[in-house]
Image (cartoon, rainbow, N blue to C red):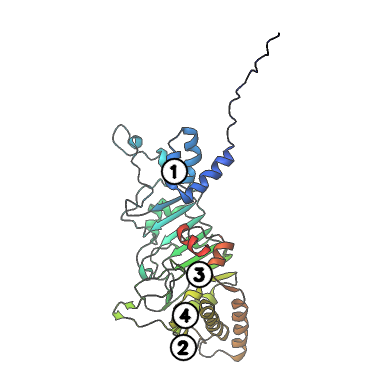
Amino acid sequence: MPTKKSKISITSPPLPLPLELISLILTHLYEVDRASLATACQVSKAMFQVAAPILYRQIHVSPLIWRDSRNDHSPDRFTPTGKEKTNTRKKKILKNAEIVIIDSHHATWCGNKSFKYPNLKTLVLNLTVNGFGPVLHGNDILEKQCSLVKCLQPKKLVLFGMTLTSITTYEMFGVPPKIFENIEQLTLVAPMEPIKPRSIWGGFSDMPKLKKLVWIFHTAHPALKWSSGSQALLGEGGAPKKTDLNALGHFLREVSDIPTYVVNSGSLHPNYVGKVAGSKVEIKGNVVDYLENLMSEGEIGPWFSSGWKEGISDTEKQEKKEKFRKRFDNIRFISMKEYLENHDWTGEILPDEAKLWIA
């Protein structure tokens, strides 16, 4: 009998995964398991080229060594003469940064003049309490010395550490006006701070390209009631009250008429609307009513209690009221969940905090 021929198996080399798919997987790791993403950088040179730009998509610039992403401990960072190289592998990777978070940047610890962020999209400034403290170099001479400031042209600017009663760049010493020239979105995040700053009303530098404005009452958990602290420079500053919202109303009114979102106002402490208790829906409704009355009637202003300059005619008042009414109609008061589900919150809210709101 003829013997049965055995089948010959041919093993084909596995098809490589498309780079787009690998990049998508690693991007997911960035949010859920950054340690594994760092490990992936060590697998091979090819994997490093894909994973490293994702790992350093967001970086910190900080005087705190453990937070500063620019720290370079690689053995090849020095020349044979002992001088630190200006173009190490890590410095090249940092140029991929799309999100740069700066903690109280100042000339006293600003070196590394070769650092550039050509791919910068979002700049986050962690402000000090009450906006005090040099965040960036406002002095022209220092600006020329600091290449970090020279290349900062973000499309989105996030100011973390805003306060409800002090909304002005006057106290944000060192924020160069040119940072505001090209931004298309400005997000102001007001966290819960123990300090209650004094009331300062002002404004921001011109933002000719601004398309979107966001104000976020930031609470780390949905169950918390937002409240600024009562501790003032000269002792206790008293409990929250309605008039604490006046500076916010003035600021929203004076900004150009662009789409504006006030996020999480329902989490405000009831004292801000003159109540003892209330649901988030009720609190938000009271906030909307109060700000609408302030803005549409012009009854707010930093230098005059009535909101109108002395000598203004009734015709001018009516024209301004119509302008303020139109401005208010372009403001949306939405919940944190609605904002997270429908807007780009990159650099504004931590992913772990966002999960609590979306769940």
Which quarter of the picture shows residue 297? Answer: bottom right
> Label 4 to label 1, Cα distance in Å?
45 Å
**Residue wearing tag 4:** 245
Q: Give the mark nearest the N terminus, 3 or 4.
A: 3
Residue 344 shows up from this direction: yes
Residue linked to disc 3: 215
User: Label 3 to label 1, Cα distance in Å?
Assistant: 34 Å
Confirm or deny contact between disc 3 and disc 1 (CB under 8 A): no
On the image, numbered disc 2 is attached to which residue? Answer: 305
SS for callout 3? strand
Q: Residue at x 35, y 38 (%)?
A: 74
Query: Which residue matches tag 1?
Result: 36
Circle nearer the viewer, 4 or 1 = 1
Q: In the image, which disc is placed on residue 155?
A: none
Q: Is residue 291 left or right of residue 239?
A: right
- What's the residue type where badge 3 is placed? Trp
Q: Which residue does the image show at 31% across and 38% down from the upper left?
A: 83
